[in-house]
Image: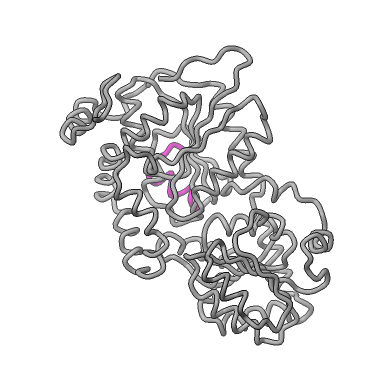
Amino acid sequence: MTKSTNAGDPLRILILFADYGFGHRAAAMALKAALEQLYGEQVVVEMVNPIDDPTAPGFLRKEQQRYDRRVTETPQLYKLGYEIGDMAVTADLLESSMIVLLHDAVRKALKLFRPHAILCTYPFYLPTLSGIYTLSGEYIPILTVVTDFTDVNKLWFNSVAELTAVPTGIARQHALQRGLIPESVLVTGIPVMPAIANEKRSKAEIRQELGWDADTFTLLAVGSKRVRNLPEALHVLNHSGLPLQLAVVAGGNDSLFSSFQATEWHHTAHIYNKVSNIPTMLHAADALLCKAGGLITSEALAAGLPLLYVDVIQGQETGNVEYILEQGAGELATDPVIALETLFHWLEHGAALLNERAANARSIAHPQAAIEIAQLAYLAAQRGPRPVGKPLFDRKRLTALLDRFDVPWRSGENRG
């Protein structure tokens, strides 16, 4: 499956991600940037979403497109689905389903790119890779990169990965309880773009570049189709009389952007739609208002910003909120009046509580997570593919499963 590398040839590292939310793609992008920053022409990095491949079932692609609507319009139903998926019996069934549903697409990615190592920022591909390795007899090193802080779904923890990078010690304990060996689980944090760690300029210098007021408390608000409560929170803050300026990012939500542009702002407000310089903006701000996504939370921590959450996806993001509140690095305010009260308390007494929250954020940050994981991936790629050791699956049961659903698995066999 994977041909050997001649001396001087670049190592090939494949990053598998999905688009159920932005966090999995963003983590993949951060890892790609870190690998290329560290190793330049010594690596070729390919990001692939197998769910987008034509051989993957159409309903999986449609679910990616429906993700925003499901988490905003039916959050309790989404929470129920998340919790059911974390049950042992359901997780086993899901793993078998992923082997069948994604076998063609994942095997195709491996055949086309011939990687020396694989980074996985989405868990559905892990059982599929186990099945492929069982049939091929070749093991390509896998590093799983978990993108939720504490409330981590069982599917993330699969022994097919030689290393699993987790964000927190709590997540590591979950991994060990679910059967991973201690030396295979590393606490690295969630990878963020290296540019966040690389930024050395002062807030004043960055604000001058952005055209923001240099000496005013600055709240960065980041929205998208998935962030509920943001317009209501900003409406209250806009009429608060607090000494602040706002930098508001609509996250590519055109209707939200238009409504912000049409707003009569009573504070200095800088309005953006979709931006590519969030790392710069984070370093220019004093606090971040957002929803409780793992990636945006990690970015804020890496920039030393306290978090004011106005939305949380129940199930998937609940653990993120609990962790940040326990560490004293932010607050949850789904009611806009509570958001106003929170900012008032942060800014009173010479911003003592704001400074405390910021210090706590810095203390739990992992700004170098992408660099650390990239180094591990490069070492894994240097070791490269090897024969499968102990069986990952019962081969007879696996081939019977694939044959039952007419999935081509023999060498040279293709669907249709």
Which SS type dominates the magenta stretch?
helix
What is the quadrant of the C terminus in the image?
top left
Residue 229: x and y, percent?
51, 75
Q: Nearer the viewer, residue 44 or 181?
A: 44
Q: Magenta stretch?
A: 170-181
What is the quadrant of the N terminus in the image?
top left
Residue at 60% from the left image edge and 84% from the top image edge? 236
Q: Is residue 251 left or right of residue 106?
A: right
In the image, residue 8 above or below residue 50: above
Q: Nearer the viewer, residue 345 or 299?
A: 299
Residue 25: x and y, percent?
51, 47
Answer yes or no: is residue 224 visible: yes
Q: Is residue 107 left or right of residue 254?
A: left
Q: Nearer the viewer, residue 389 or 242?
A: 242
Query: In the rendered image, which quarter is residue 188 located in?
Result: top right
Residue 317: x and y, percent?
46, 61
